[in-house]
Amino acid sequence: MGNTIAEKILASHTDDGKAYAGEIVEARIDLLMVHEVLGSRILPILKEMGFKKVWNPNRVLVVNDHWAPASDINSAEIHRRNRNFVKEQGITNFCDVDCGISHQVLPEMGLVVPGATIIGSDSHSTTYGAFNAFSTGLAATDSALILATGKCWFRVPETLKIEVTGDLPERVMSKDLILKIISELGPDGANYQSMEFHGSTIETMSVGERMTMCNMTVEAGAKCAPMPLNQDVKFWMEDHAPKKKWKEVASDTDAEFVDNLHFDLHENPLEPIVAPPDLPTNGKPVAEVEGVPIDQAFIGSCTNGRIGDLIIAAEILKGKKVHDGVRFIVTPASKATCMEALERGIIKILMEAGGIVTNSTCGACVGGHLGVLGAGEVCISSTNRNFRGRMGHQDSRIYLASPATVAASALKGTITDPRSV
């Protein structure tokens, strides 16, 4: 019996070169990413452990992104502790508050390569599966142990194979596709599984579209989502990590999958999908929620704040004005993304339409700052989670959608099908 991508990558990082679904293995970690949880939770654990030195200061990325710049004294202290740790440990990869969101800046820095094991202190670290890597999010204690040893134990996940064929219709995005897929699976339909995406639709996706897909697999409970390599990722590696050595990893033809799902977009064309409160897996066709009044429309986050997302929003809003009474907030995923959008005139279009463009941060997505919701307010958001209270008050409501649907809704003042504007 052959092996899946997840099995192969983990096996290549064990001492005996073996990893089969269901087994417990200890694997070497190629890169650890930590954000504000370092200064808030990990450092106290390290102190209890008697920790002295990071296992490899070149294989750690520290990012201040969730409350950037600091929104209060507490976040300022966390950022200060992170900066001190970076200096004390000689960590070479550090992104302070002017850099961007961790899941965007890590690939931009050329720190992810196919076949790598990448761990993040953030649940959406599944994002790097877009680059043919094994990546997952772990909590503070596991992250602390990796900082100290460079290793971690895993139960090797079973793999769910998802094949998607056909073209995405105009103004239907990969966000709509992943919302559709996880609505079929439910919040634990892929619990502790590796989600492997195949098919012509996935093969032709841009790097940004792939990152959106992998980012949200954790909402169905997935452990990781290592995608097969495509040409766009190869071009990305040439641009961002030209000196790094890597090897493509593919599942064997006789690999064993726990299940196979097929989505044929030719026979069953995909519509824009919206997930009403309070679960990301609540996705349904936009027609079923169209007309719901909104107070805020948000484009940004590690899910949908990339250049392709800003481009489609600008296409929809160019020469138009956001509906009166709607706060339209745009947060580019990184400083590099923002600079490119500036150079292409996208920021100007969005601001002239009435948009508020912020620095790159997780702020609005996590209800930290720069877009916190009040009681009873409704937001349509390109983020990954719509849990109760996620973006502010417990009595606010969040609808998840693609950047195209968010932009169209901002224009009309109610949840709107982007194909209709």
Image (spheres, rainbow, N blue to C red):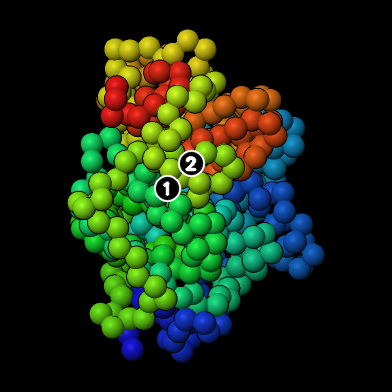
* Label 1 sits on residue: 179
Q: Is residue 163 positioned above or below 413 on the image?
A: below
* Residue drawn at the location 50% of the way across and 17% of the way down: 326
Does 13 sit left or right of 46 as displayed?
Answer: left
* Residue drawn at the location 72% of the way across and 66% of the way down: 51
Q: Earlier in the sequence, mark 1 or mark 2?
A: 1
* Residue drawn at the location 21% of the way across and 53% of the way down: 267
* Label 2 sits on residue: 275
Which amino acid, mark 2?
Ala
Front-lying residue, 27 or 273:
273
Percent across and percent down for residue 109 are 40, 49
Does 84 sit left or right of 342 as displayed?
Answer: right
Q: Is residue 49 positioned above or below 76 on the image?
A: below
* Residue drawn at the location 41% of the way across and 15% of the way down: 322
Q: How busy is the neighbourhood of tag 2: few (under 14 within 10 Å), some, or many (20 plus)?
A: many
Q: How busy is the neighbourhood of tag 1: few (under 14 within 10 Å), some, or many (20 plus)?
A: many
Q: Is residue 245 positioned above or below 411 on the image?
A: below
Percent across and percent down for residue 180 are 39, 49
- Res. 379 image quadrant: top right
**Which label belongs to residue 60?**
none
> Considering the numbered disc 1 on the image, is that residue within a helix, a strand or a loop?
helix
Is residue 384 at least partly visible in the picture? yes
Q: Would you say the residues marked 1 and 2 are in contact, meaning their CB atoms lie under 8 Å apart?
A: yes
Q: CA distance from mark 1 to mark 2?
A: 7 Å
Percent across and percent down for residue 78 are 70, 42
